[in-house]
Image (cartoon, helix red, strand yellow):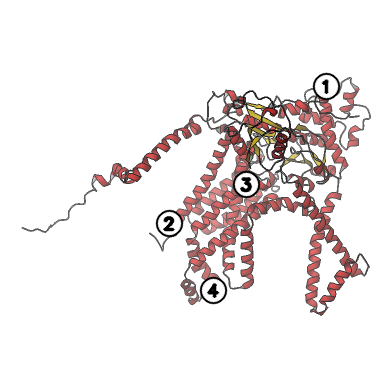
Amino acid sequence: MSWVRTEMALAQPAPGSVRGPLAWVRKNLVGSVGDTILTILGIIIVAWVLPQVISWAFINAQWTGPDRTVCATVAQGGIQPDGWSGACWAFVNAKFGQFMFGTYPVEERWRPILVAILFVALLVPMLMPRVPRKGLNAILLFLALPIVSFVLLVGGMFGLPHVETSRWGGLLITLSLSFVGIAVSLPLGTVLALGRRSKMPIVKMLCVIFIEAVRGIPLITVLFFVSVMLPLFLPAGVSFDKYLRALIGVSLFAAAYMAEVVRGGLQAIPKGQYEGADSLGLGYWQKMGLIVLPQALKLVIPGIVNTFIGMFKDTSLVLIISMFDLLGIVKQNFSDANWATAQTAKSGLVFAAFVFWLFCFGMSRYSMYTERRLDTGHKR
Amino acid sequence: MDFQTRSVSVIFLDLTGIIAFDAVREWEAARRLRCGIPGNGLEWELRSRGKKNQGLPENREKGLWVMKHIAIGILGAATFGFMASAASATTLDTVKAKGFVQCGVSTGLAGFSAPDDKGDWQGIDADFCRAVAAAVFGDGTKVKFTPLSAKERFTALQSGEVDILSRNTTWTINRDTALGLNFVGTTYYDGQGFMINAKKLPGVNSALQLSGAAVCVQSGTTTELNLADYFKANKMEYNPVVFEKLEEVNAAYDAGRCDVYTTDQSGLYGIRLTLGSPADHVVLPEIISKEPLGPAVRQGDDQWYHIVKWTYFALLDAEELGITKANVDEMKNSPSPEIKRVLGQEADTKIGTDLGVSNDWVVNIVKAVGNYGEMFDHNVGSGSPLKIARGINALWTKGGLQYAPPIR
């Protein structure tokens, strides 16, 4: 007779009170009095709002139509019954080409579409860590693609008709401005951040002046200045392309902000890392490239993506110099009397918000993924 | 409705002039000093500055000299460039050389210039530019549009970025003189009006009955000032509900936060279309300000000014003579000598060539956009969703203000 167990007790599943959907509801929705009240309030709000949103956006929505009559009630001069309220996706549908490409000539629109396909084909493998040949991919994406895109979009060579940038618009402007801004601002911002922490006085001074000057002026002021004042000083016929001016302005702006984000990362690296690199006999660029920057940039991924997302949305400010990004061209089309209804503005703005959200949310999720993948030192 | 930015533009133009003038003066003085020519006294200043530097090492002085020359060079280049733009080839020559008319339009105003489903600009202002292109090239499609914000529009015309500013712009003396524009005429007689919610204000059929009403208005516009003047002059009280953006004003009015909406009357019709129940809203007959909207060109090029001006008159004369898009080819053989003259069918006619265009210019204009009446109906009148009545924009023969001198 023995009081000691001789065989292992078999592992048992957790009791029903702590697993399964019922337990989840008990833990997360009605865990305490406060939680229960919040849950009830939440359900009431969702039950109140959601049916209206769904009926407006889907059930009552008009998807196709020739003009405003499909989106207006009889009293408003349309065909819908009185009291009808639904999204006018027909407006978005009719203007979709413009929202994407602006007034880019219809017969030439295969060119921006081809650029978009190339962009996605190069960007997706770049973003997936498992796909090999990152070096070649980066060269194609950051060196070859801009040149090919320039030739395709602007034209005027290889038998492609020339398309002035004044005819570009919509998502084409939003994406091209922000892609160039992102591609320029990260390396330039890193160089500026290093320059600001440099021991060489002139380099340091120049970097500080640039960063502080740019951060001290609103983007609107710069855009307005280059579009309204610059033409008066230039002889007639000589004019910088307005799009080019916006491109340079947006890129330099983002670079100044990026420099401060990267500098934050550099300051978070302990002195020992710098000294360790020095003691190994590494030169300045080796020290920065191999030891400091990889750690610093990893630390500030949220800040970097924050700047990217901010810049993506700031591109809407080019409206001030009469360039029409996605939001600008949507708003411009509200003035088309053939589509003027009570629902037009709401539908157009919801569409623009959805597209902006799609891109910003995508960037945000990818940054979280990258953070987790690179967070080898402080994993919690 | 106009943003009050005019004075700023004027000051800015003056500044450009002063900078340019100073640069030329200094450049000239420096040249005289080097050549030893006695001049306007400024060289003494330069010479004495040179004396002060005598004690310094030579390369320092050289550096200063180089820097000054670079500065003068840049300013001088900018100045001469600016002057050259005014004195270079005529606008007609440049337009013919590039093969299209560059036309400044609004960034979107229903009925005047707004993009259609294909992204082509439609409206009275856009059609007017097509008419000019038709007069110059015989082809109304040879026109490119530049959308301009209210702030950019005058600079764009002054700097030569556009050849015509056809952008619902009010003709005022300040713009004709100080800003260096030439307005060619009034393509649309507009004025500030009132729209009321007839359900909230039953029985109101005149603006003089609006005492005590809540009025929605956009801030920082002449509209706001006109409103204050009108109510003060008629000894009425009102409660202004002011917003920065047009969209906000629209939303507030639609939501019933005010009983009255005031802006240019042409705008009121466009806004009414976007309201929940347009039938409840009435545009009152009173017009409390003069807003003659018309195209403008740069000063200093009479030939181009005449072409644009007579394009406008040709549109009116065509309507008066009953020449339409549909019947223009038949009208060429009309027995009426006046119609034949206008359409360039008279023997040895020089009317068109004297203007700098071909003799069948009126035919081309009418073929491209129709006559003024057709243009009006198609864009803002009965043929459009706006349904604006001709009113004072009718021909003088029908009780309106549109009157054109004869083409002969």
Name which quarter of the figure residue A333 lies in.
top right
Marks 4/3: CA–CA distance? 42 Å
Amino acid type assigned to the residue bearing label 2 in the image:
Arg
Confirm whether circles 2 and 4 share one chain. yes
For mark 3, what is the residue? A173
Is residue A163 visible from the viewing direction of this image? no
Marks 2/4: CA–CA distance? 31 Å
Residue B301 drawn at (x, y percent): 86, 44
Label 2 close to label 3 by CB (< 8 Å): no
Residue B330, disc: 1
Label 2 close to label 1 by CB (< 8 Å): no
Q: Residue furthest left?
A: A1
- Residue beneath the point at 84% across and 58% down: B21
The correct choice, above or below, for B292 with respect to A151 in the image is: above
* Nearer to the camera, A185 or A129: A185
Residue A170 drawn at (x, y percent): 62, 43
Residue A251 drawn at (x, y percent): 62, 56
Name which quarter of the figure residue B148 lies in.
top right
Amino acid type assigned to the residue bearing label 1 in the image:
Glu
In terms of sequence position, does the residue under pointer 2 or pointer 4 come before the other?
A: 4
Please state the chain letter of the residue tagged with numbered disc 3 in the rendered image.
A
The correct choice, above or below, for B239 with respect to B321 in the image is: below
Please state the chain letter of the residue tagged with numbered disc 4 in the rendered image.
A
Q: Quadrant of the C terminus of chain A?
A: bottom left
Q: Look at the numbered disc 4 and give the secondary structure of its residue.
A: loop
For mark 4, what is the residue? A283
Residue A372, disc: 2
- Residue beneath the point at 50% across and 52% down: A125
Amino acid type assigned to the residue bearing label 3 in the image:
Ile
Crowding at mark 3 (Cα within 10 Å: few <14, some 14-19, many 20+): many
Q: Look at the numbered disc 3 and give the secondary structure of its residue.
A: helix
